[in-house]
Image (tube, grey):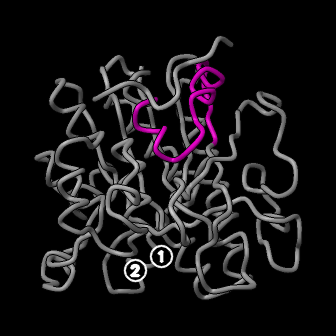
Amino acid sequence: MSVLFIFIDGLGLGPDDREINPLAAASTRWFRLAGSLPAPGADGRVVVATDATLGVPGLPQSATGQTALLTGKNAPFMAGRHINGYCTRRLAELLEAHSLFGRLRAAGRPAAFANAYTPRFFQDKVRLRFPSVTTVAQRKAGMALRTLEDLARGEALYQEFTNALLRARGYDVPLVSPALAGARLAALAARHDFTMFEFFQTDLCGHAQDFPRALRLLEDLDGFLTGALDGTDLARDLVVVGSDHGNLEDLSRKTHTANPVPTMVWGAAASSFANRIRTIADLAPAILDYLGVVPAGALANPPEND
């Protein structure tokens, strides 16, 4: 029994308006998310409109949103505001005490962050000084960051999973189709109780208001997700897609949005898992409970009968 969590930065639920919302115009199976949500289980998944504001005024931001996703704690409330960009000392303390990675490793359960880091990352003093939430979460849990050597062995993926960006930056790596990348992620996830993959090109694209690129990203994500699903034993395991805040669903603006984000769940236990999800802070406790690891404190939303 395992959970594969595919985190897509800046993916919200917006209006059914093809002029501003790529998710209303995309020719995809899984990412045409505008207007009414699909009926639970109708296409093998359950989709939940999930609150990302957590009751804190202002637009949701990446650092506090991702901390909430990984800890189950209301990070913006505890920090006093939504925090953008990089991990602060207060957020690092929350991650050290409550992150999924740390909780699972303390319980002796194998966990993986699938993203590979480039050599340039380890040489970049600015990035090392201002790390992302996911980077800090790994370090606080005592996990080694994966590298391009891991990618070459099939033990990691780059954040842009086709490797096109790596090749453009001069790295000698092969191009990979989205479907094959998804299959490789599923194979990695099969060897761990919990695996997370982070994709943030969607957030960058939203800030750039680049509609044609948004459509291409959604099409690639669609193939990637299909590859991951095809490679997962959904009678036993869960695949969960989630986000930290809205952005890509409204390209009429450069900023994040206060829209709900989609939580999509596949697997035999998808309905009972989805019943727990109201806000992004509900994901971590639900994952821990599904894996049989007692969360720190009660579940944010107790399970309901199917």
Residue numbers of the magenta segment: 264-286
Q: Which residue is at a point 56% across and 67% down the rendered structure image? A: 10
Please give the residue where the numbered disc 2 appears in the rendered image. Answer: 167
Q: Quadrant of the N terminus?
A: top left
The front one of 237 and 72 is 72
Q: Which residue is at a point 21% across and 61% down the rendered structure image? A: 90
Would residue 196 appear left or right of 136 to someone viewing this image? right
Q: Amino acid at mark 1?
A: Ala
Q: From this viewpoint, is residue 222 visible? A: yes
Residue 117 at x, y percent in the picture: 26, 67
Q: Which residue is at a point 15% across and 30% down the rendered structure image? A: 106
Are circles 1 and 2 on residues that touch, CB within 8 Å? yes
- Number of disc labels: 2
Q: From this viewpoint, is residue 175 visible? A: no
Q: Does 280 appear in magenta?
A: yes
Which secondary structure lies at badge 1? helix
Please give the residue where the numbered disc 1 appears in the rendered image. Answer: 164
Which secondary structure lies at badge 2? helix
Name the quadrant containing residue 62.
bottom left
Q: State the CA–CA distance, disc 1 to disc 2.
A: 5 Å
